Amino acid sequence: MTQPNALPQLPLAGVIGAPIAHSKSPVLFRHWLDQMGLTGHYVPLHIEPEDMKEALKTLPKMGFRGVNATLPHKEMAMDLADEISDRAQKIGAANTLTFRPDGTLHADNTDGFGFLENLRQSAPDWDPASGPAVILGAGGAARAVICSLLDAGVPRLILSNRTRARAEDLAQAFDGDIEVIDWDKAPARLGDGRLVVNTTALGMAGKAPLEMDLSELHADQLVTDIVYTPLETDLLRTAAARGCQTVDGLGMLLHQAVPGFERWFGATPVVTDATRKAVLA
């Protein structure tokens, strides 16, 4: 009796976190898969930290080629990986995990890549070497932003966080010209940056507002916020009113997903207006 030919394995990928129901990544990946006529699925997976190790052993056996990792798994993913990219090492966290055919787990961080690509696409005239950047916040997102800006050639960073010690620890982790200032001194220094970046959750829907005097912002600046709910934060609205060029945070989410999609589904997606509309819908 002739055995039927084995069907090719359906490409699977997903995003792991706790919680994860809020993630827009499944909508984004579905849009790209449909747009390019590719088979495969990308699913949200709620995995608690205590189950992380077992999950990363089980997923490849189920046909998963890789997963994106979000809170609270980004640091643990590094500990469980067999190979870690240079940029993930610098940032100290991983968001893109690939299950290789040889059974090893590769960890990468594409947050900084996504941040930089968002600026390059939305503000193509911005030159990293044109002047300093003022960065608000010293959490995980700030690490990725600092890493990407230093690699891109930004000459100096001015870093401020509500807890100064955390900003000082972060500055020590990088080789570069990084000046740490107190949070209450940040408003007076906003005008010193050619680029101003909010990496905090302040201003996000459901979070506390960014209560800061923004009167030093001026028209020669580019201002961006990694928050994308709401799409136009109070910071961006005020910056635009003062003549600044502004870039919202949605593009960072979209661009950081490109490397993972390419590795897991074998095609390179392009971030377009249609991509944004699909995710926002």
Image (cartoon, rainbow, N blue to C red):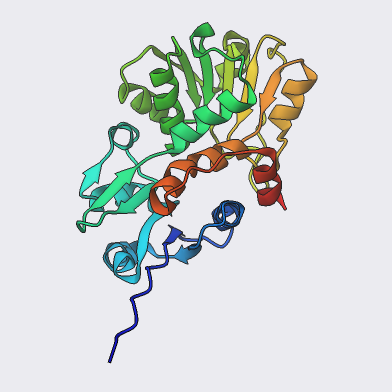
Q: Residue at x 20, y 49 (%)?
A: 82
Residue 53 seen by the camera: yes
Labels in figure, total: 0
Please tell me which residue lies in front, 135 or 90: 90
Q: Please, is residue 256 above or below residue 97 in the view?
A: above
Q: Please, is residue 211 above or below residue 266 in the view?
A: above
Q: Where's the N terminus, which quadrant? A: bottom left
Q: Residue at x 76, y 28 (%)?
A: 237
Please tell me which residue lies in front, 246 or 206: 246
Residue 105: x and y in percent read: 25, 53
Residue 67: x and y in percent read: 40, 55
Residue 95: x and y in percent read: 40, 46
Q: Residue at x 52, y 29 (%)?
A: 117
- Which quadrant of the figure has residue 66? bottom left
Q: Residue furthest front?
A: 1
Residue 179: x and y in percent read: 43, 14
Q: Is residue 172 left or right of residue 38?
A: left
- Which quadrant of the figure has residue 170? top left
Q: Residue at x 65, y 50 (%)?
A: 279
Q: Is residue 217 left or right of residue 11?
A: right
Residue 229 seen by the camera: no
Q: Please, is residue 41 above or below residue 151 in the view?
A: below
